[in-house]
Image (cartoon, rainbow, N blue to C red):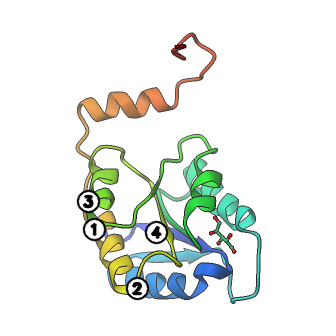
Amino acid sequence: MTPRDRIVIGSDHAAFRLKEIIKHLVSTLGLDVEDVGTHSEASVDYPAIGRRVAALISTGRFQRGILLCGTGIGMSMVANRYPRVRAALCHELFAAAMSRRHNDANLLVLGGRVVGDMLAEEIVKTWLTTPFDGGRHQRRIDQLEAPLSEGNTPVA
Ligand code: RB5
């Protein structure tokens, strides 16, 4: 990421507190952060927030984003339904690095009830600073976007 790049971030109530911490971290790294909510610990449904972030990535208005919920599972399910969104649920540093190097993940997902604050911060730093390896991995990324109806769906 370069200093002018903007990150879109969103969470439900279960990860509101961690979102605020991560938002501050991303700002201190010199990146602009667009927060699409939620803005308190009042209960909200995670699909609504996940869709906001995923749509902004899918349409190219933001290149990268971060989504958080209690486990990170619901947000991952929402986000990966969108074309061009490659959301990676990462709770350790190896996956965070590899999700960038091999999968060119454009959305990091965290579970606020799973991971501690300091580990979450390290995961975010790793994810934001690790580049995509390209090469053979680009071919596989291209395959992700291919329609399933074109005879490319293997059957057992
Ligand atoms: C909210 O209680 C919780 O279900 C949500 O944050 C998330 O973990 C869903 O996957």
First of labels 1, 4 by sequence position: 4
- Determine the CA span between mark 3 and mark 1: 9 Å
- Determine the CA span between mark 1 and mark 4: 17 Å
- Determine the CA span between mark 1 and mark 2: 14 Å
Question: In this figure, which residue is indicated by the disc labeled 3?
Answer: 94
Question: In this figure, which residue is indicated by the disc labeled 4?
Answer: 6
First of labels 3, 4 by sequence position: 4
Residue at left offset 64%, top offset 44%: 81
Q: Does the residue at mark 1 contact the one at mark 2 (Cβ under 8 Å)?
A: no
Q: Which mark is residue 117?
A: 2
State the image coordinates of residue 145 (x, y, percent, origin top left): 52, 31
The amino acid beneath tag 1 is Thr
- Determine the CA span between mark 2 and mark 3: 17 Å
Residue 13 falls in which quadrant of the image? bottom right
State the image coordinates of residue 9 (x, y, percent, origin top left): 55, 71
Residue 38 as seen in the image, left or right of residue 135:
right
Foreground: disc 4 or disc 2:
2
The amino acid beneath tag 2 is Asp
State the image coordinates of residue 26 (x, y, percent, origin top left): 40, 79
Give 112 or 5, whichever is nearer the viewer.
112
